[in-house]
Image (cartoon, coloured by chain):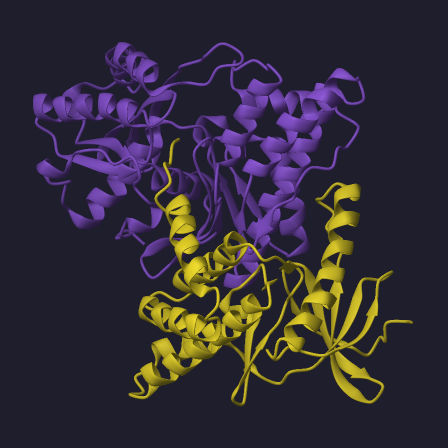
Chain colours: A purple, B yellow
Amino acid sequence: MVVAIGLEGSANKLGVGIVRDGEVLSNCRRTYITPPGQGFLPKETAEHHRKHIIPLIKEALEVAKMEPKDIDLVCYTKGPGMGAPLVSVAVVARTIAQLWNKPIVGVNHCIGHIEMGRTITNSDNPTVLYVSGGNTQVIAYSCNRYRIFGETIDIAVGNCLDRFARLVNLSNDPSPGYNIEQAAKKGKKFLQLPYCVKGMDVSFSGILSYIEEKGKPLLKSGEYTVEDLCFSLQETVFAMLVETTERAMAHTGSGDVLLVGGVACNVRLQEMMAQMAKERGGTVYATDERYCIDNGAMIAHAGALLYTSTGKPTPWDETFIRQRYRTDEVEVTWR
Amino acid sequence: MDFPADYQLVKQGAEAKIYKGTFLGRPVIVKERFCKTYRHPELEAMISKERLKAEARGILRCKALGVPAPAVYYVDPDSKLMYLEEIDGSTMKDLFTSLLASDDKDAPDKLKQLSLSIGEAVGKIHAGHLIHGDLTTSNFLRHGFKTYLIDFGLSSVSTLAEDKAVDLYVLERALISTHPGSDQYWTHILASYSKSYPSGSKEVLNKFKEVQSRGRKRTMVG
């Protein structure tokens, strides 16, 4: 039995979670929220993480009713992510590992999402769509790796949504994606946007430029409302994601889909994916915002899997961070 | 034209159902593009129409450029049906999978030959400015000594090196992710690509490196 504490801070969420053999004992989170029209920058985000991480670790221990001596393993996000926020969290992970004299494991953020999703939903071998502010990947498992079948060739879908929200001045609280989703429910009129699928890959940058150029005049003239644009944007980008996922499923011959990452909370995306899977005779597995959005528990869980399967922590001189740590670089020793 | 009831469903792909049957006395493959209910109706109508057109045009252009592709016998735009010549071959996906797993000492040589034929086909269509749009090992059929290209629904015509580079990038990714251990054959594909597209492959391959660095080493956050 391994009790692991996981520290996550690769983007604007700071999370600390404690997990015992896949059972989540605590999963606390603080989000750095910027004013409307602004995104989060590395320096300010790292400052936010530094300010909150110690109280958050205390809170996680308290919720789990544990003391540092009850912890067996310290896990932290090694990458991918923004440099400064990752470093601010890794430093704390290395410090508590030495203070408490515990082994330390560096975890790939994407693998954290996938493994937490598989455990929570009990899905054995799904095709994974990982969609967040920084990642858009269609992933399937084969020969000890999570292999990336499709991916964005420019910006991530969440980044596209965030930047659209900034263009039309939607609030970043609780998240731009959530506010787009709510506004889209009131949208009726469909605006045709560029639809860009290249095999199993997608591209979103053209949509953003198109809205920058054409969207604003349409809003001004009153022809379309912000709600209509939110609706059209969601329908277009999600259709692209569902289509590439379906292509990957047809190519690999798998039937089930697992949705992970911040954008996966979106109920409309889940609905569309479910419709596609139903037509193919498969199932969609999705998690709610506790696990979709970046959190500490998933890092603890993936770290514990890695540690128990190999019996080895990450060597001390490799406990650094990597901003561009790819999903398919990690050897999966636990499946 | 009614869709004959005795046609047999052989495969459900991502976009279409594939049936086998006979048409005017010839064995045919019928590709039925089914409606995607998850898509907004306006978007769905636009996409399915565009792709049916793109497929018919892509096949014609491909054949004209000297790369084998199944002949189009008949297209029914209202019911989104396409009647195609049946090619009795294996997909490169199946061939690669079995050859990569086999102990046969000739396997590496066979794989090399297949890779060269893939590169040649892509080089030829790019030389004629045809972009396939969905190059995966599932979309090459090997019949005898001929390599056929199929599935032109995402095809387009472009002279831009960028579009050709993305086409290659999609193929590289599909090859490596579907067939672990096939990395070495990618160099053969590129070699014969350059050979069959002498006028522009250099520019495309430079662009290809750029596209690669945009995709794989791009900053990943969150």
- Provide residue B93's location: percent of width, then percent of height: 48, 72
Quadrant of the image occupied by residue A53 = top left
A86 left or right of B31 in image? left
* Above/below status of B211 relative to B3: above
B104 left or right of B127 in image? left
Quadrant of the image occupied by residue A30 = top left
Image quadrant for the N terminus of chain B?
Answer: bottom right
Residue ID at (55%, 50%): A245
Residue ID at (62%, 39%): A238
Residue ID at (23%, 19%): A66
Can residue A186 be seen in this snapshot? no
In the foreground, B80 or A67: B80
- Provide residue B73's location: percent of width, then percent of height: 79, 78
* Above/below status of A83 relative to B104: above
- Provide residue A38's location: percent of width, then percent of height: 48, 15
A104 left or right of A185 in image? left
Image quadrant for the C terminus of chain B?
Answer: top left
Find the residue positioned furthest to the front.
Answer: B199
Can residue A147 be seen in this snapshot? yes
Residue ID at (85%, 86%): B24
* Above/below status of A53 relative to B117: above
In the foreground, A90 or B144: B144
In the foreground, B168 or A111: B168
- Provide residue A216's location: percent of width, then percent of height: 68, 21
